[in-house]
Amino acid sequence: MLSYLLLSGISTGAIYALVALGIVLVYKATGTINFAHGDQLMIAGFLAWTLHVGLGLPYLVAMAGAVAGGFVLGALAERIGFRAVLRGNLVNVVLATLGLAFVLKGVARLTWGGISDYLAFPPLVPPDPIIIGDIILLPQQLVVTAGALAVMGAFALFFRFTTMGKAMQATADNPKAARLVGIRVENIHMLAFAVGSAVAGAGAALMAPVTLLYPDIGFMLFIKGFAAAVLGGLTSLPGALLGGLAIGVVEALAGGYIDSSAIEVSAFVAIMATLILRPRGLLGGPPPRRA
Amino acid sequence: MSARPETLLTRLMPRPIWVGLVAAALLAVLAPQANSYLLFVANQLCIYVILAVGLNLLVGYTGQLAFAHAALFGIGAYGTALLKVHFGLPFIVTLPAGALLATVVGLAISLPALRLTGLYLTLATLAFAQFTLWVFLHWEGVTFGAGGFRVPRPDWLLPGLSPDVGSFALALLLAIVMTLAAASLVRSNTGRAMIAVRDGEVAAEALGIDLLRTKATAFGLSAFYAGTAGGLQALMLGYVAPESFDLFHMALMKAMIVVGGMGSIVGSVIGAGAVLFLLEGLRAFKGAQEIAFGLLLMGAVIFFPRGVAGWLQALPGWAERYLRTAPPPAPEPDAVPEEAKP
Amino acid sequence: MTARIAVEGLGLSFGGVAALSGVTMAVPPAEIRGIIGPNGAGKTTLLNAICGIVPPTEGRVLLDGQPITGLKPSAIAARGLRRTFQTSALFGGLTVLENVVTGLHTGLRAGLLDGILGSRRLRAEEAEGIEKAHRVLEFVGMAGFADRRASALSFGQQRLVEIARALVSEPSVVLLDEPAVGLSLNRLSDIDRLLRRIRDERGVTLLLIEHVIRLVMEVSDSITVLAAGTVIAEGRPEQVRQDPAVVTAYLGTAVHA
């Protein structure tokens, strides 16, 4: 029981971690939060559905489509919802991106279905559990976890070894110095939004077969991802991973040992408790200065 | 140089308060003659005004980006209606009780929230809002779960009036009183302390303004407004369900104060009206409502960050001031100062 | 005579790095005390520690012989200590007059209900506060700007309003962090005169951080020199000017005498 719950918690948590990764990335680059992040993910998930189920393209193509769609949506979010208000205060950025979140949600509702319509995504692997000793593994969960880890690995490599990634790192560390050495900070902002959203797009394609798709899933995942990011300290990429896993496991344990209805609420209780006890999160440093 | 007394002319100039009171009087006279839909819209307007004014005190005046307003609205509605349904108490008791319950919860969440700033506060209140919604949905023995519940509406609320007219009259009265109270408060030392905390916490503290106390006051007041509005909502509809207090409604409330003008009481009233107008116009289409309000919120923040109030400020007599006495007209800046008094 | 404000062995470290250590000084009533030192010497940190914004990790601060270390900044302000900030810290949403009235906050008794009801007590206090604010605006030479939005003023004007806001509650000590920043050179003599008048007419003790050395030398009764978080010299301006330790500390940082 416990091992099953832990494994399923890790698999959910890996998705939360992917969402959190994008949130942390944007926060590090800009000092703000993109409230439309989850809804960009949701749209990317519907794109994957259209490509895979609607047009019958192979799953990997659909996933690539979701990543590309996420990238474009992220870049658009930066241009539309963020750049114009960056010089305003944090409240304005939050409200502008919150507005964008609702626009995306409305678009999804009109395009892909009504309020309680769930779009089913065919499973990638046979649903029969693999039983090793007394440990039960669901293949789908293994695929999700492995996929999420692969995406995170690719992301880490991008960040460490590409020019773009290094420029982003430099801007996050010191925006003024980055400007001095010729990095266009506006481009870095856009890149952070776009790459964060592309990662979320990959997450959407991975989780769609498990969770089904519906317009309201975006904001819900955003809150979980935001919580994971804060748990991990908002500025730490490994922290986002840890935070995501922690929330996934807490939810699974609450679902297993308390009641299935406790799954949802346990995350919120955990967030509130963490913020009361340790307002800077688990691995967080001081907040970065706004660029 | 002392403040000059107001002349009859300056006193009669069109001021927001007079325009508002005349409009309210018109509403009060015309509404009972109106059909039930118009009566509903007028009633909803009063409730939204209370919500928007309360939210603006916290977000617009004190600068605390909290996301719990829809949840506190719900706590007021559930508190009012459940006390009625489970204990049979009259509305005259349950309405204030619901508002007080919301205030207590608002103060309770403000205590840990006061240690948090900016995004951390946002997340904590967002989590609290989702938690509250979950309680509405899942504590079925008490809250009747996702389907909501009916609550009997009294017809004795105001003698001789139908429930519709009676609840509207009460909502109108409370909207006027609470708007005037807020307009008065922001022109007092308490209101200036709130603005000071918004514009510069460190400088405010260095002037002797207690941050915790000021923020807690704003949280408590704002929650009281939300709770009162919630009780009125239950009274108006005779029906309470969790979906009225979700994040979409939170975004609606944010849109009200952004469109009307952050840090403006007049703006809160106008914003509430604008949002209600759009909401009713798009009633049937949930997706279209979301797109419209999303665009409204984005557009207002990006293109008119000071909202409608920003334009009104330019009119004579409409500029919002934060002192009791009207300051004397400013002399030319280059004028030689008068002889300094000892 | 006890010092109006005394600092005893004040130390402050951030994560093991000492920003201040063993700072001791005593300033008698109605004195202008200049605090100078090269960039990064800890001057602003010292003001922050005195007024409680960044509580010191060692030592204590006495106001009229009473320890104020560990109190909240708002409680320290209520005891009659005010400050201005290096970057203008006026409340941008308020007018000049409203900003200055806000400086009276600690002395006001009107509460929440008074505010909601617009009670007689509130109105009486407000009228009195407005009167005081007008007087202090005149005192700093900003009488004509009362009804302007604070954010619409020039930087130098904002500094003057900030001084008015600090003075309006009749504090015994005011900490001034670079009041001359943003003022044109021909207004330096104005600020010089203003600081003396604050001392002489209002009996306020001033702690003055200033980069314009000429101003500090002319206006200060005595000067404390900080370098790397410690006091390296103290005395009358002409003594400090000739102190070899001070000259060494400033070498390479261009002394504008």
Image (tube, coloured by chain):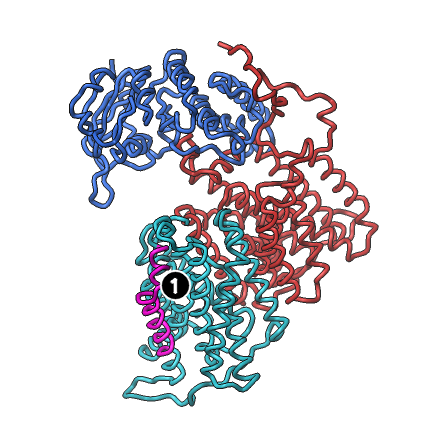
Side of B271 relative to A13 (left or right): right
Image spot of residue A166 (x, y percent): 33, 61
| Magenta stretch: includes residue A161 | yes
In this view of the protein, can residue C107 be seen by the observer? no
* C237 is higher (above) or lower (below) than A32: above
Please report the residue visible at 52 percent of the width from the left and 66 percent of the height from the top: A73
In this view of the protein, can residue A34 be seen by the observer? yes
Specify the colour of chain B. Answer: red
Task: Determine the residue located farthest toward the right in the rendered image.
Answer: B33
The chain to which mark 1 is attached is A
Q: Residues within 10 Å of mark 1 (few under 14, many from 20)?
A: many
* B221 is higher (above) or lower (below) than C128: below
Q: Which quarter of the image is occupied by the C terminus of chain C?
A: top left
* B126 is higher (above) or lower (below) than A122: above
* Viewer-nearest residue: B52 or B169: B52
Specify the colour of chain A. Answer: cyan
Side of A77 relative to B51 (left or right): left
Please report the residue visible at 48 percent of the width from the left and 61 percent of the height from the top: B131
Stretch of the chain drawn in magenta: A145-172
Q: Main secondary structure of the magenta part?
A: helix
User: Label 1 amino acid?
Assistant: Ala
Q: Which quarter of the image is occupied by the N terminus of chain C?
A: top left
Residue behind mark 1: A228
Specify the colour of chain C. Answer: blue
